[in-house]
C-alpha cells in the first residue's frame, strides 16, 4: 500500500479525494466539470439533430430519432459497464490501495476490450432485424439503418473514451474528461458540416462525425493518463488472472450495464407503439426528448458524482459521509429538477423549434409537431424531480457494491413502460405514449429509495458492530 501517491494526488489536483472535506462543496466541485462536459455532449448531439432536421428534413430526423432506443440499448449498456468497472477502481482509490488500484485498471482494459468487440459484432449483425421488429416505417427504415450501423461499427472508439473517462473520474479527476469532451464536441460540429453539408453523406455523415470525434477524444484521454497519472500505470503483473477481483468487476459492471439495457428495452417497446402513429409524431417525440435530455442533463451528472463519491467513501469505510452526501445530493438534484421543469414548460415551443426548419414542411405538419412535442414536455416535466432522484439512489447503490436493486429498478421501469405503451395509447392516444415515461420513473424510484435506506442501515449496523 502506498498512501503517499494518494496524498500527492489530493494536493496537486491530479485527482479529488472525496473521503475528506465538506460533502456539499465536494459534490458541487466534482459535479461542475461533468455538468459542463455533458452540456457540450448534448451540444453536439443537438447539432447532429439540428443539421439533420434542417438540411435533410423531417423524415431524416424521424429516422435518427427512431434509432434512439436501440442506441441507448447498446451504448447505454457499454456506458453502464465501463462505469461499473470504474466503481471498483474508485473503491480501491478511496482505500489507498495502490496495487489494488492498478489491478483494477488492468481489468478495466481487459474487460472493456473483450466486451466491446463482442457487442460490436452482435449489434451490427442485428441492426436491421431490430428495426423491423419495432415497426419502423418503410419510408425511414433505410435511413435509420444507415445512421445506427455506423454508430455500432464505431463502438470500440466509444468504449475507449468512456473507459478512460470513467477511470479518471474514479480517482476524482472530473476536469480532464471535460477538456476532451469539449474538444470532441467542436470537432463533431465541424465534421457534421463537412460530411452532411459539403460531402452530402446524409444521416450516415452525422454518425461518422460522432464516431470519429469520439475516437480522437478517446486516444487523447489515453495519452493523458499515460503522461500524467503514473499511479494508474500498469505492468504485465497487474494483468495476472485474479478470479475474485474479476468477478467483482463483472458483477458491478454487468449489473450497471444491464440496468441501462433493461431500461432501453422498455424504450424500444415504447418506440414500437410510437411508430404506429407515423413519421410526424416520431419527429415530434424525437425533438421533445432532445429538449428533455438537454434540460435534465444535471440528473445524470449527480448520478455519476454519487457513484464515485460513495465508492471512495465505502473504500475508506466512512458510511456516515455517504449518508450525508446522499441527503445533500438529493437537495441539489431536486433544485435542478424544478429549474428544468420550469424551462421545459415555458419554452417548449422555442426549444423544439430549434431542431426543425419550418420552411421545409407544410403548415399542418409543423403545427402537429409543435403541439405533439408540447404535449410530451408538459406531461413529463411535472415529474422531473422523480427522474432526478432515481439517478441518486441508483448510482449510490452501485457505488457501495449493491447492484441487485438498481438492476431490479430497471426491471420495474421496463414493466411499467411496456404496460403503459400497450394500454394507454388506446385510451389517451399520443398522450398515452408521453405518460408512459413518468409512470416508468415512479416504478423505478420507489423501490430504489426503499432499497437504499434498508441497505445503508444494514451497512451502518455492521460497521458499528465491528
Image (tube, rainbow, N blue to C red):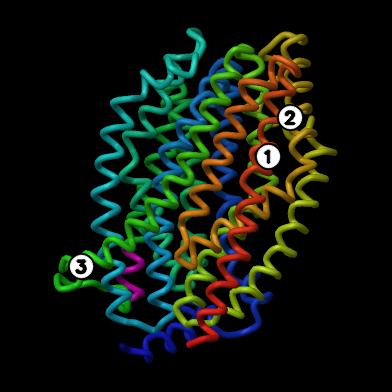
* Nearest to the observer: residue 310 or residue 409: 409
Q: Percent x, y for residue 408?
A: 51, 47
Residue mark closest to the camera, 3 vs 1: 3
What is the count of numbered marks? 3
Q: CA distance from mark 3 to mark 1?
A: 43 Å
The residue located at (83%, 45%) in the rendering is 342
Farthest right residue? 346
The residue located at (43%, 61%) in the rendering is 166
Mark 2: few/some/many CA within 10 Å (<14, 14-19, 20+): many
Q: Main secondary structure of the magenta part?
A: helix
Mark 3: few/some/many CA within 10 Å (<14, 14-19, 20+): few
Of mark 3 and mark 2, the one earlier in the sequence is 3
Say which residue label 3 marks. 242
Mark 2 element type:
helix
Could you say which quadrant of the image residue 443 lies in? top right
Could you say which quadrant of the image residue 239 lies in? bottom left
Q: Percent x, y for residue 183?
A: 48, 53
Could you say which quadrant of the image residue 383 lies in? top right
In the rendered view, does 189 fall on the left or right side of 235?
Answer: right
- Read off the magenta span: 223-229
In the rendered view, does 338 fall on the left or right side of 209?
Answer: right
Say which residue label 2 marks. 376
Mark 3 element type:
loop
Of mark 3 and mark 1, the one earlier in the sequence is 3
The residue located at (47%, 65%) in the rendering is 176
Whether residues under marks 3 and 1 lie with C-beta atoms below 8 angstroms apart, the answer is no
In the rendered view, does 300 fall on the left or right side of 357?
Answer: left
Of mark 2 and mark 1, the one earlier in the sequence is 1
Whether residues under marks 2 and 1 lie with C-beta atoms below 8 angstroms apart, the answer is yes
Say which residue label 1 marks. 292
Amino acid at each position: 500500500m502506498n498512501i503517499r501517491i494518494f496524498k500527492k494526488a489530493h494536493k496537486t489536483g491530479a485527482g479529488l479525494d472525496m473521503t475528506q472535506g465538506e460533502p456539499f462543496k465536494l459534490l458541487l466541485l466534482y459535479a461542475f466539470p461533468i455538468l459542463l462536459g455533458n452540456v457540450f455532449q448534448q451540444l453536439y448531439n443537438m447539432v447532429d439533430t439540428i443539421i439533420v432536421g434542417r438540411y435533410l428534413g423531417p423524415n431524416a430526423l424521424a429516422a435518427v430519432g427512431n434509432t434512439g432506443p436501440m442506441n441507448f440499448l447498446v451504448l447505454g449498456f457499454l456506458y453502464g459497464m465501463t462505469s461499473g468497472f470504474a466503481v471498483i477502481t474508485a473503491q480501491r482509490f478511496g482505500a489507498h490501495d495502490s496495487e489494488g488500484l492498478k489491478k483494477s485498471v488492468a481489468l478495466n482494459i481487459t474487460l472493456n476490450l473483450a466486451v466491446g468487440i463482442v457487442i460490436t459484432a452482435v449489434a451490427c449483425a442485428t441492426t436491421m432485424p431490430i428495426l423491423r421488429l419495432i415497426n419502423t416505417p418503410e419510408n425511414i427504415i433505410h435511413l435509420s439503418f444507415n445512421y445506427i450501423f455506423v454508430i455500432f461499427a464505431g463502438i470500440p472508439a466509444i468504449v475507449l473514451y468512456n473507459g478512460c473517462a470513467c477511470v479518471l473520474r474514479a480517482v476524482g479527476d472530473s476536469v480532464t474528461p471535460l477538456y476532451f469532451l469539449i474538444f470532441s464536441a467542436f470537432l463533431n460540429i465541424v465534421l457534421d458540416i463537412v460530411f452532411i453539408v459539403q460531402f452530402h453523406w446524409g444521416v450516415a455523415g452525422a454518425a461518422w462525425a460522432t464516431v470519429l470525434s469520439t475516437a480522437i477524444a478517446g486516444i487523447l484521454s489515453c495519452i493523458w493518463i499515460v503522461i500524467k497519472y503514473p499511479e494508474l500505470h500498469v505492468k504485465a503483473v497487474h494483468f495476472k488472472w485474479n478470479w475474485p477481483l474479476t468477478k467483482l468487476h463483472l458483477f458491478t459492471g454487468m449489473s450497471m450495464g444491464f440496468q441501462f439495457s433493461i431500461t432501453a428495452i422498455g424504450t424500444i417497446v415504447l418506440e414500437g407503439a410510437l411508430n404506429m402513429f407515423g413519421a410526424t409524431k416520431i419527429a415530434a417525440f424525437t425533438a421533445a426528448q432532445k429538449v428533455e435530455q438537454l434540460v435534465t442533463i444535471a440528473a445524470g451528472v449527480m448520478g455519476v458524482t454519487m457513484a464515485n463519491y460513495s465508492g471512495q467513501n465505502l473504500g475508506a469505510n466512512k458510511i456516515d459521509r455517504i449518508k450525508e452526501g446522499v441527503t445533500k445530493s438529493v437537495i441539489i438534484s431536486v433544485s435542478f429538477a424544478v429549474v428544468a421543469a420550469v424551462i421545459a414548460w415555458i419554452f417548449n415551443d422555442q426549444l423544439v423549434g430549434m431542431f426543425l426548419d419550418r420552411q421545409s414542411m407544410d403548415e399542418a405538419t409543423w403545427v402537429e409537431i409543435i403541439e405533439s412535442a408540447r404535449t410530451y414536455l408538459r406531461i413529463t416535466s411535472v415529474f422531473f424531480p422523480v427522474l432526478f432522484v432515481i439517478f441518486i439512489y441508483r448510482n449510490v447503490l452501485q457505488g457501495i457494491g449493491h447492484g441487485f436493486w438498481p438492476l431490479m429498478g430497471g426491471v420495474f421501469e421496463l414493466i411499467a413502460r411496456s404496460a403503459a405503451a400497450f394500454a394507454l395509447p388506446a385510451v389517451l392516444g399520443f398522450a398515452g405514449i408521453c405518460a408512459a415515461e413518468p409512470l416508468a420513473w415512479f416504478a423505478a424510484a420507489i423501490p430504489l429509495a426503499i432499497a437504499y435506506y434498508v441497505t445503508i442501515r444494514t451497512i451502518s449496523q455492521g460497521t458499528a458492530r465491528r
